[in-house]
Amino acid sequence: MNSMEDLLQWPDKLISAISGKLPAETLQSLQEAFRVGICVSTDFSGMGCPEYAIGLLQRTLLSKCPTGQVGTVGIRFTRCTDKQPHCRRVLMNHPGADQRCCFGDMLGRMPTGVATMLTSMLTEAKQELKEAKAEKCTRQEQLEIGSEFMKRALHLVTRISPEDLAQWRQDTHSHCFQHEGMCKVFPPPCSQFKLTCNIAGVNCYDFSSRGARLGWMGDSTMSFLQWVLERRMERDHIVIAECVVPFPHSILDLALGDLYDLAVLSFSPTLLGKPYARKRKYMILTLRSSLTWRPWATARSHCDVFSDTFGMKVMTSGAIFFRAPDDEVQEWIKAMAMKRGLPTVRSSGRLWSYFQVIGPGARNRITSTEDATLAKLATNGTHVDPRRLDFTFDTTQSKDFTAASLTCPALTQRSLMFCMSKRRCQTPFEALETHGFNLYGEALEHHPMCPFKDILGECSEAQLRSLAGNGMDVPSIGAVFLFVLAGTSEAAT
Ligand SMILES: [Zn+2]
């Protein structure tokens, strides 16, 4: 794959890989799953990357359906949840969003009794942590306090009776921003739909090597526990949780192992041929009483089968993620100039360059990374003009994380990617395109323009960058979703 257009046509590439590399009936059973119908809910939804990916997959899969099989039920999105208002704004402008509920902070739906007990356990653990810190306990010992708390909390959550779970499932209502009123959070599964699936990008900040690293003592712990509780209430056939690689996935066995089988995939979008390094862990839970993995999917490790099926060579560089039209780049630079109190154009009447409108600190960081890159290349006997290098690096990262390379590094909420050959950083829309949204190009056969581009245009630059930093890589979550649908079948009763 060597151009942005090529990369954006990933739904076709993934589906072709399935028909080319997997047993002949796999494609048909996939199409059948989409035809019979799948209900999808998302939590920690962000800007709705899974919904965007699944929508594209459905479009491509059905276009390959033999004629006479039309009349598809397809995918129904039932719920999304995010506590950030700008995320909800984007979610509520997805196509067909009026059909699904959009909720705020999921902690608001924790049953009161459970919330009281868990809060008191957490307060106790935090006190213990405070004392440990005062006694200068090692970091490992401090993290251990968090793990112990989590074990105790899960002990409580997993012992809630099926009757209580059923009651809460039926009774839980929450304010729905889409329908402007109280809506049922867990509507009864519709008989038309055969499969139900929940996808969540569980908060990774406390486990990321660049984040707060507070582990289970961080702010996201209570929402994670509520998410576990809801999984026990809803018992979807498939659950997919995405997080950073250090996330201790064995906790899911402890939380849901009595109901679900856990399979873990760990990969970066580079595996799918995309010049973007964002290694993430995808934890796939399948409801043991309903689904079982097909023999081909478990013949070797899930990771091996996944990479053999979808693996593609990276043929291009991160520079392709810098494709904003010149006039938009100029407008963006002009806006930066004004923010710094400069006139919109230079006194000569000529346009500002990117370097002229950024602060001295940013300029220094860029030049020092460039110099280090050139010096490294020179030791191998290569002398080049930086303008000829399609290398990218994140100008906001500390020295330990900054290395210019042909593969674009992972975006965080504050990232500003610089491309040496383009002599500028990424516009916020380009950051979103790195995640897999079609915002600047043409409508392609397997990837139309992003249908909620206008609403993104109304977000602030900081909001757009945080959407890009938090979101899931679109083709990656699409590939995981396809893999689990293709790789599982109904469990024998
Ligand atoms: Zn609603």
Image (cartoon, grey):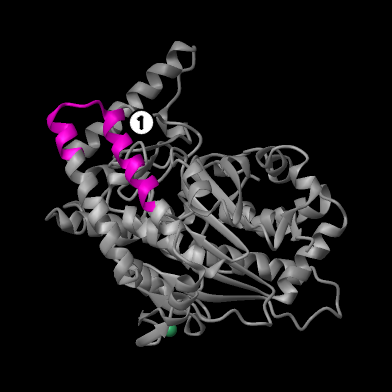
**Amino acid on which the number 1 mark rests in the picture:** Thr
- Report x, y in % for residue 130: 16, 39
Magenta stretch containing residue 408, yes or no? no
> Which type of secondary structure does the marked residue at label 1 adopt?
loop
Q: In this view, does 194 lie to the left or right of 77?
A: right
What crowding class fits label 1: few (fewer than 14 Cα within 10 Å), some (14-19), or many (20 or more)?
some
Identify the residue shown where x is 71% and y is 53%. Answer: 13
Please, what is the dominant secondary structure of the magenta stretch?
Answer: helix
Residue at image mark 1:
402
- The quadrant of the image that shows the N terminus is top right
**Picture quadrant of residue 209:** top left
Identify the residue shown where x is 45% and y is 23%. Answer: 384
Q: Note whether residue 452 is visible.
A: no
Q: Note whether residue 11 is visible.
A: yes
Magenta part of the protein: which range?
Answer: 129-153
Is 264 rendered above or below residue 460? above
